[in-house]
Amino acid sequence: MVNEAHTPGRWTVGKGQYALMALVMMVAGTVGVIAGRSWGQASNGTSQLPSVNQITLPKGGLLFKTSEGKLAAKLDADEGGGFLVIYNTSEKVAVTIGASTYGGGGLIGLSSGKGAGDVLQLAGHDQGGSISLLSQKRGKRVVELSADDDGGIVSVNGPTGDEAVTIGTNELGSMINGTIEVRESRSGKLLWSAPPTARQK
């Protein structure tokens, strides 16, 4: 952790000063909004000023850059909804946060910072949530943890992304049992299961 009080070139601000600064900014912003709307109503009867709490995203999104001119973040939208992309110092995607087209939930993706796609994904959807670990080279889901109304399931996949080992639940009448299935990853052929009556795909 960086000690701000002993870091050259930085100001030391106490907790009380932070609170005061935040309060001043809130008051100033509120006064500005009220004054702007009052001025517009007084001059034209109805305000002609653009709404101060709305920003229309331009084509290509809204870009944020550092003082050195490097891309730091991007705010944009697509068919799934809005999303935020955060870049590392090499201007490669590091984190993606946004709405998902699947199930109307949210999605967080973490990459290795080398521009090769996500290696970790956290998703929420209308049936539950899921965590996926992806291979860096192939971009395939190799470990998946998901949950829905029927319970949870853990899947360990082969290099092609096909299931090899699955641990989950199986409903047998009024009983819900745990199951383990071992499959040939590419063909999907069931090799072994416990209990032996576990469901087959």
Image (tube, helix red, strand yellow):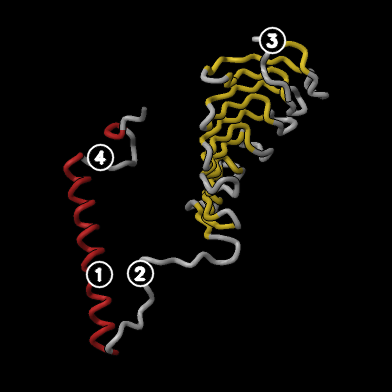
The residue labelled by disc 3 is: 196
Report the side of 55 relative to 98 (left or right): left
Q: Earlier in the sequence, mark 1 or mark 4?
A: 4
Picture coordinates of residue 170, whole percent (x, y) = 59, 20
The residue labelled by disc 2 is: 52
Q: Amino acid at mark 2?
A: Val
Instruction: Identify the residue shown where x is 30% and y is 34%.
Output: 4
The residue labelled by disc 4 is: 12
Q: Is residue 163 visible?
A: yes
Looking at the image, do the residues carrying marks 3 and 4 touch, with CB atoms under 8 Å apart? no
Looking at the image, do the residues carrying marks 2 and 1 touch, with CB atoms under 8 Å apart? yes
Instruction: Identify the residue shown where x is 73% and y is 11%.
Output: 192
Spatial distance from mark 1 to mark 4, Cα to Cα? 29 Å
Q: Nearer the viewer, mark 1 or mark 4?
A: 1
Q: Secondary structure at mark 3?
A: loop
Neighbour tally class for label 3: few under 14, some 14-19, many 20 plus, Cα within 10 Å: few
Neighbour tally class for label 4: few under 14, some 14-19, many 20 plus, Cα within 10 Å: few
In the rendering, which numbered label is found on residue 32? Answer: 1
Q: Earlier in the sequence, mark 2 or mark 3?
A: 2
Looking at the image, do the residues carrying marks 1 and 4 touch, with CB atoms under 8 Å apart? no
Q: Amino acid at mark 1?
A: Gly
